[in-house]
Amino acid sequence: MSAVIQQQEHKQPRYDRLGNLAMVMPLPQDDSQDELQHALRLSGILQTTLDVSQLIDIFAHEIIRLVDYQSISYTQDELGIKHSIGNSAAHSCTYRLVVSGETLGELVISRRKKFTKAETTLIETLLCGLVYPLRNALLYKKAVEAAHKDPLTGVNNRASMDEVIDREVNLAIRHKTQLSLLAMDIDHFKKINDNYGHAVGDCVIKAVAEAAKTAIRSSDMVFRYGGEEFLILLSNTDRDGATLLAERLRQKIEETCIICDGTHVSTTVSIGVTCTQRDSETRESLFARADAALYEAKSGGRNCCRYQAAAE
Ligand SMILES: Nc1nc2c(ncn2[C@@H]2O[C@H](COP(=O)(O)OP(=O)(O)OP(=O)(O)O)[C@@H](O)[C@H]2O)c(=O)[nH]1
């Protein structure tokens, strides 16, 4: 196994106090104008997208003409971004990208041959062309995520459900697969608020969301649809699969001891289940059946799951 040699570790590009691009990195006396031109040109090309992965792809594609490398990988932990191009090699330069005190992530460039001083200087100058477009792309990604996420639980919000449901129903009809919908509601949640206070109520909502997130596959989606109501969309899942998952989730929540600021709380949920059955299926028909099934579960004593099929 070959050792990875950190040729530059956690090297941060420097900026003047105004964040002036031309002043970002100290340029060598020779060829400095050329390098600056490359960075400015690169920056212009990179301004054309707000997609982080695409940005790294363009950066990688552009710099290969100037610096030979085997791989480039970019990681941004906060947004869970990991994007790699090529296979990593023995020698690497690692850069922690920082703008105005804000960390944008880490970029690693590697190759079999050691990088020369002139090459690392060039890479650092080129990175100046990347950081501002990258910061804009990350800000955009954060804003888009915030618009689609419920701030309390981190799961998708109602607006997000409204955006995806039609597409998912249409896909299921077109591909003749089954889409299942679970409507899950916390039982007697008002009592939890009344007995323990809203902070504990919020903590219970978070715990239920977490249980739902961990119970589903990565292709499935959880949405907080109302105060203590969640919708779960299961693609490629038929009645048997959906009722099995619903029952497993119900049991898991029943068995979980939720600890909120030292207070131990237990709770249960009722779940209504339905799935797409015919080509005329719409979001309205699916929602109506999931709702009716949830109502049946509530009136059937709560802490249970019910399935509602489409009328013949
Ligand atoms: N803590 C907290 N409470 C919320 C939130 N959203 C809604 N609620 C409360 O959730 C409660 C829901 O009460 P109900 O609709 O009567 O339902 P329930 O008590 O769960 O009764 P069943 O659904 O019939 O089992 C209300 O008291 C709302 O104020 C929230 O974000 N946080």
Image (spheres, rainbow, N blue to C red):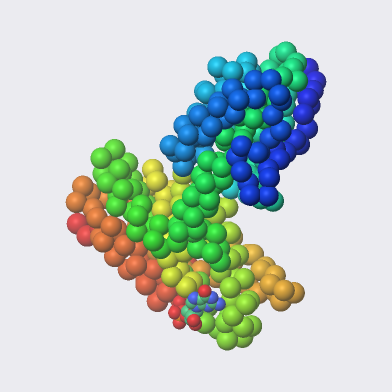
In the displayed structure, 306 sits above or below 18; it is below
Task: Judge by depth and name the residue closer to the eye, 299 or 94.
Answer: 94
Give residue 261's quadrant in the image.
bottom right
Which residue is rendered at x = 62% and y = 22% of the image? 71
Q: Residue 233 appears at what percent x and percent y?
A: 41, 53
In the displayed structure, 158 sits above or below 119; it is below
Which residue is rendered at x = 29% and y = 38% of the image? 175
216 left or right of 239?
A: right
121 left or right of 168?
A: right
Q: Residue 2 appears at what percent x and percent y?
A: 78, 17
Q: Quadrant of the C terminus?
A: bottom left
Give residue 8's quadrant in the image.
top right
Task: Judge by depth and name the residue closer to the eye, 243 or 211.
Answer: 211
In the displayed structure, 35 sits above or below 292; it is above
In the displayed structure, 184 sits above or below 263; it is above
Q: Residue furthest bottom?
A: 194
